[in-house]
Amino acid sequence: MTQETEISETLRAVFDHIDAHRDDHLRRVMDYVRHPSISAHDIGIREVAAMLVEHLTGLGFEAEAVPTSGHPMVLGHRSDAPGKPTVMLYGHYDVQPPEPLDQWVSPPFEPTIRNGRIYARGIGDNKGQHFAQLLALEAHLKVTGTLPCNVIFLLEGEEEIGSPRIAEFVAAHADRLKADLVVTADGPLHPSGRPIVTCGVRGMAGFELVVKTGKTDAHSGNHGGTMPNALWTLVHLLGTMKDAEGRITIDGLHDPIRLPTNAERAAADVLPVDVPGYLADMGLGRLDEPADRPFHDRVMFHPTLTINGIHGGYGGPGTKTVLPCEAIAKCDIRLVPDMTPEQAVACVRAHVEKHAPEGEVEVVISTSGMLPSRTQLDNPFASAVVDAVRTARGNEPYLYPSVGGSLPDYAFTKTLGLPAFVTPYANADEANHAPNENLEISLFHDGIRTGAALLDRLGKMSS
């Protein structure tokens, strides 16, 4: 990557403005996350979408909450710089449910500062991070009255329930989403505190294996040995899908996988990893099999098969000698390029047909799924994003070919053909999706600087 760290006079003035308004920015982000926007429960969604439209309109954007068959998308445009790139800033204004409430030290929607951190639901994932981007836009406008590049702001209201409509929305509104690149501020920094730039995410396919062997549960003595046990059927079937050495043994699942490029392989190999520290933090005695697989390869370049939960029979107190007639396993497969949810589930169905007793197991698709996404490391905008992060934070970011989680980047990379990058602003222990979600105040301010540097850096390029 090109080592460009010189800061222009304009960007210095923008940084000075950001530094001078730290207290105001902190107050405003705390007010923002005070408003619940829980997509799973349809709480506060439209109210927060309206707040965002008002905010974008106040920044001179053409903005609206665009209806969908679910929760609205907040969409804003501002074109100040003919001939300069257009960046789409993607984020999501919905948050996870806050339960279990009794594990929060302070109420989830009453933002509280403790030990240099803001504690609130959504402060890290993702309201605090995209609010930092909004404040970066505002800083440029306050200092210069204009933006150095063109900006589309797209905020989704259903990311925390799997982004079921993002691909449909992007395809239907492609004419309003004409950009040169997409940047998402989401997720955590490296555990060392060093910034990262991510060029890819894994996809996901979710499914359930539903076993039914009889019309009712039965006495395990009277019918044990004659009636098939649904839980044993399920356990044996699952055992044919992944072996003890960690190999997924579903025929055809790996066929479409695209091997990492030499550049991706090299980028993964230089990433630091403290395996003993990871094991200690997670309370683990070992890494999952295969034991010889490099740490970062596990989450970047390989699919996974996860049993999320098994349900059936009796698990309550005491003894109940029941022979269960039904059992369910919830599972997910994380996908790498060029796998698809449809291909993965088709392979699961074929495997079940081959290995399960006839007519006893049904495969039920439990999520709409997400395609994996990968932007090439040599994309011209990759160096610009890396340089912006370096300029704002003062140290070199780690470049990740991919991360293990899933975001709907495929809607941009595959439907629109755009490069997509993720620039996290949050601390590694942000506790997103968990009680006591938090964001370090210093990292929130660094995020505003990073957003401002990105706009400045893109303004030096031609579209």
Image (spheres, rainbow, N blue to C red):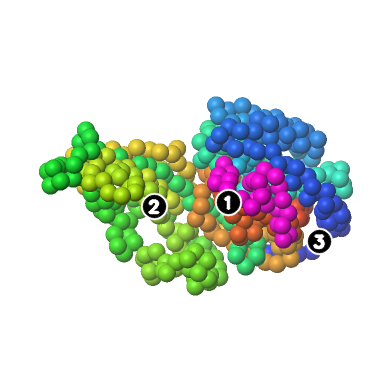
In the picture of the structure, the residue carrying the numbered disc 1 is: 103
Marked residue nearer the N-terminal end (3 or 1): 3
Q: From the viewer's perspective, is 94 left or right of 336?
A: right
Quarter occupied by residue 53: top right
Q: Can you see residue 338?
A: no
Mark 3 in CB contact with mark 2 (< 8 angstroms): no
Where does residue 344 sit, x and y in percent of width and height? 36, 45
Residue 7 — which label?
A: 3
Magenta span: predominant SS is loop
Which residue is located at x 34 percent, y 61 percent?
A: 246
In the picture of the structure, the residue carrying the numbered disc 2 is: 306
What secondary structure is found at the residue carrying circle 2?
strand
Separation of disc 3 and disc 2 at Cα?
46 Å
Quarter occupied by residue 176: top right
Query: Disc 1 residue type?
Result: Gln
Question: Residue 107, relative to residue 444: is it above or below?
Answer: above
Marked residue nearer the N-terminal end (1 or 2): 1
Disc 3 versus disc 1: nearer the observer = 1
Tell me which segment is drawn in magenta: 97-124
Which residue is located at x 47 percent, y 44 percent?
A: 371
